[in-house]
Image: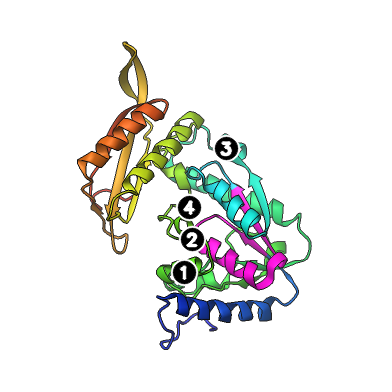
Amino acid sequence: MSGNVRPESMARITTKELAEKFIEEQVEAIREQVKDKKVLLALSGGVDSSVVAALLIKAIGKQLTCVHVNHGLLRKGEPEQVIEVFRNQMDANLVYVDATDRFLDQLAGVSEPESKRKIIGKIFIDVFVEEARKLDGIEFLAQGTIYPDILESKGVKAHHNVGGLPEDLQFELVEPVKLLYKDEVRVVGETLGLPHNMVYRQPFPGPCLGVRCTGAITRDRLNSLREADAIVREEIGKLKRLPWQFFAVIPDIQSTGIKDGKRYMGWPVVIRAIDTVDAVTAKSVLLPMETLLKIRDRIIAEVPGVNRVLWDYTDKPVSTIEWE
């Protein structure tokens, strides 16, 4: 499969057998393209980059170097899962960079959402470039481009490297899943043996928890958000029918609470669960009261600094899916 136009004859990858055939073809294509050269991949732990990493490991093994940048804004357990799956289980060349302090120090006091996004994006590129320049002999850059990226960008993403990389790091691209839709990428990922909860990870914005810890991010509020979000995902994840997306938000406001007979100031946690087909519009999901009460009780008991639990049941429009 070549070019950026998906062949009409290309079968939808819906079964393990079709996925195995696709994997076999891509392993051969990767080896033909890369030969004995080295490849670099920014591995976020998201669906697309994880599947690309697994494909490349199968095809070229140690010729691939993955760089995982932990900016302190990931969900609970995600950096640890990347290390466990790719370094410990798949024996990949994995460079793990804990840049938490660097990101959070730069974000301190910044409340405007777009400014936060730009800071997160810039520091990520800076850290990735620093790590890339430590490596010798890299000639290819792997990306988790998928077919909707090409359709939405009219091919731009498929022809250019990760935005913001300097001239000395403009490598030839390796994009093995660029003709697949997201659901097909998931089938390929499971066939490659990636964990189910990694392959079926919920949509997660680029700035990660940075847009769910609204306003100026503080470390204590961010840590509480990470714990509350894990509870929300665990409890809603027990339902027979799962919403398309569900998560927690901690807005930059405080309210009065009572603990041990004394008043104190704490944060609210907001529960958000929505269904959507195209993310252009979205409907709030009516969660069972039993689930909401369980989430409430666990958050109040387990998450420091929180004294209220709220439920956002607003549709899009008028609200957006994310709070920022």
Disc 2 target residue: 47
Q: Where is residue 139 in the image (x, y as percent from the top left)?
A: 72, 69
Name the N-terminal-most of marks 1 and 2. 2
Q: Is mark 4 on a helix, strand or loop?
A: loop
Instruction: Please state which of the two labelled residues, at mark 3 or mark 2, is closer to the viewer.
Output: 2
Left or right: 115, with 129 as reference point: left
Q: Is residue 303 above or below residue 163?
A: above
Left or right: 300, with 182 as reference point: left
Disc 3 target residue: 106
Q: Are marks 3 and 2 in contact (CB under 8 Å)?
A: no
Q: What residue type is labelled 1?
A: Val
Q: What residue type is labelled 2?
A: Val
The Cα atoms of the two marked residues, 1 and 2, are separated by: 8 Å
Disc 4 target residue: 206
Q: Residue at coordinates 55% horizontally, 50% vertically from top-left? A: 81
The Cα atoms of the two marked residues, 1 and 4, are separated by: 19 Å
Please state the extent of the stretch shown in magenta in the rendering.
40-69
Q: Are marks 1 and 2 in contact (CB under 8 Å)?
A: yes
Name the N-terminal-most of marks 1 and 4. 1
